[in-house]
Amino acid sequence: METAAAALKTLCNPETEVSAHYLIATDGEVMSLVPEALRAWHAGAGRWGAVTDVNSRSIGIELANDGLSPFAAAQMDALTDLLKGIRARWDIRPERVIGHSDMAPGRKIDPGRRFDWKRFAREGLSVWPDGGIAGDVAEFTRHMQAFGYTATDDPDMLLRVFRLRFRAAASGPLDAVDAGMIAELARRFPVDANFAWV
């Protein structure tokens, strides 16, 4: 959707069969659309770790953004405040705050390369690898699964999804930096069923 108004219209239309708990406009306005205790239809087909029905196990937050543009400061500030409240109410650990692209690799790309995951990690709302360890590229897929990503027979797609979130400026083949980052994340934050979705 090009605007929050267009997204709101879609999210509130029963014929579209899509909804979310929250929508945040570029000016920072937070619209509550579905009570947190109820199921929304924001995730579609996708999984995280053993969770195959993400809609039933998460709180969906939609951001008015085309996936290519920078996110407005007011919008990011509003998301920060909202996430702090959600995490406190539902006791969600930061490693379980994920994006559409995390739970549906290859099918979804949002929140996209311009989303500042590192900022949220600094604020304790998400995770980021400390870095500094070299990884074994042969273990990349296994470590992706240990962290929560879906098993796939397309390692290139997994690399694209990983870099979309953790190394947006990187290009070229899988390397020891990618492998080291995901190895650290898998070791520090092995997947379980308690997560939120962004």
Image (tube, helix red, strand yellow):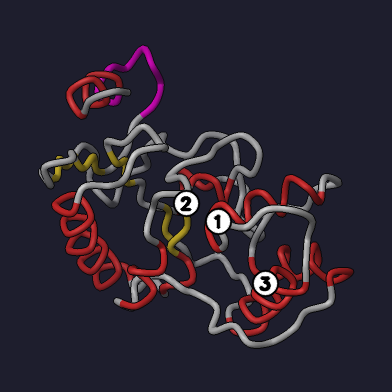
Residue 154 location, x and y as percent?
82, 45
Q: Nearer the viewer, residue 109 or 57?
A: 109
What residue type is disc 3 on?
Ile
Tally of numbered discs: 3
Q: Which residues are magenta?
A: 11-18
The picture quadrant where one finds residue 6 is: top left
Q: Quadrant of the N terminus?
A: top left
Of the two numbered discs 1 and 2 in the rendering, the one whose residue sits closer to the viewer: 1
- Name the disc covering residue 39, or none: none
Residue 11 location, x and y as percent?
29, 26
- Asked if the magenta segment contains residue 79, the reply would be no
- Name the disc covering residue 99, or none: 2
For label 3, the residue is: 182
What residue type is disc 2 on?
Gly
Residue pictured at 73% horizontal, 45% vertical: 157
The picture quadrant where one finds residue 192 is: bottom right
What residue type is disc 1 on?
Ala
The mark that comes first in sequence, 3 or 1, is 1
How many neighbours does mark 2 have within 10 angstroms: few (below 14), some (14-19), or many (20 or more)?
Answer: many
Q: Are marks 3 and 1 in contact (CB under 8 Å)?
A: no
Residue 85 location, x and y as percent?
20, 66
The picture quadrant where one finds residue 46 is: top right
- Name the disc covering residue 169, or none: 1
Measure how far apart labels 3 and 1 are at the Cα level: 16 Å
Measure how far apart labels 3 and 2 are at the Cα level: 16 Å
The mark that comes first in sequence, 3 or 2, is 2
The mark that comes first in sequence, 1 or 2, is 2
Horizontally, is 159 left or right of 76 in the view?
Answer: right
Q: Nearer the viewer, residue 99 or 17?
A: 99
